[in-house]
Amino acid sequence: TNATCSSGGSITGLTTSGGAPTPVITWNGVITPTMNLSGASAGSYTVTVTDGIGCTATSGPYVIGTSGGPTINSTNMVVTNASCLGGGGSITGITATGTGLTYNWNSGAYSTLNISSLNTGNYSLVVTDNNGCTASLGPINVGQNPGPTINTTNMIVTGTTCGANNGSITGISATGTG
């Protein structure tokens, strides 16, 4: 079996027969009590059996691979700012690969990959697979859209004449997004 971030791999099912009694079993030169190798890191392994009179048999190499754990892809991530009143922000477009994935944003505040209705702040994602291996992303900053602005640079005030209702204020502009 392959090694994971939380446990070593193994090579099992090999047997030895024949030869003089009391064989010595070594995996890559390290004496082991049985033909089964467990708790091993990823790599190449060869087993050698030496019997009681010095005859040897070798088998391998056998390769223990690694299960790399989950991966996070943020290439298509879109961060939408919160409104000037708060809320409405989002983080979307993130993908994750692995087996049995769970998602945890900001220590449990959110448990889905895409999150919304966010206030301004920093958000960090931890993805965990079924082996307990993790990958993380962040912090990701969700900003805040500014409130409207008023521009009076071109403002013109025209007064009334002789008590008539003919005064005006023009040239004022307002811009912004909620």
Image (cartoon, rainbow, N blue to C red):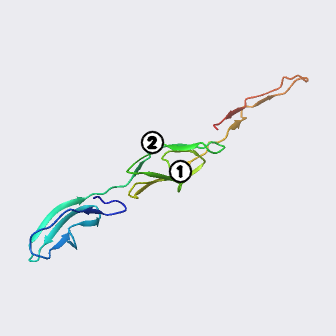
Residue position for label 2: 76
Judging from the image, what secondary structure is the residue with disc 2 in? loop
**For the residue marked with disc 2, what is the amino acid?**
Asn
Q: Quadrant of the C terminus?
A: top right
Estimate the x, y position of residue 71 in percent, counting from the top left: 39, 51
Residue that extends furthest to the right in the rendered view of this protein: 162
Is 17 displayed left or right of 173 in the figure?
A: left
Estimate the x, y position of residue 161 in percent, counting from the top left: 88, 23
Residue position for label 1: 110
> Which is more toward the observer, 155 or 119?
119
Vertical comparison of 13 with 143: above or below = below
Is 130 displayed left or right of 118 in the figure?
A: left
Vertical comparison of 127 with 83: above or below = below
Q: Quadrant of the N terminus?
A: bottom left
Estimate the x, y position of residue 140 in percent, counting from the top left: 52, 50
Vertical comparison of 151 with 97: above or below = above
Residue ID at (88%, 22%): 164
Q: CA distance from mark 2 to mark 1?
A: 20 Å
Residue ID at (39%, 52%): 70
Mark 2 crowdedness (10 Å alpha carbons): few <14, some 14-19, many ≥20: few
> Which is more toward the observer, 115 or 10?
10
**For the residue marked with disc 1, what is the amino acid?**
Tyr
Vertical comparison of 150 with 167: above or below = below
Residue 101 visible in this rendered orientation of the protein: yes
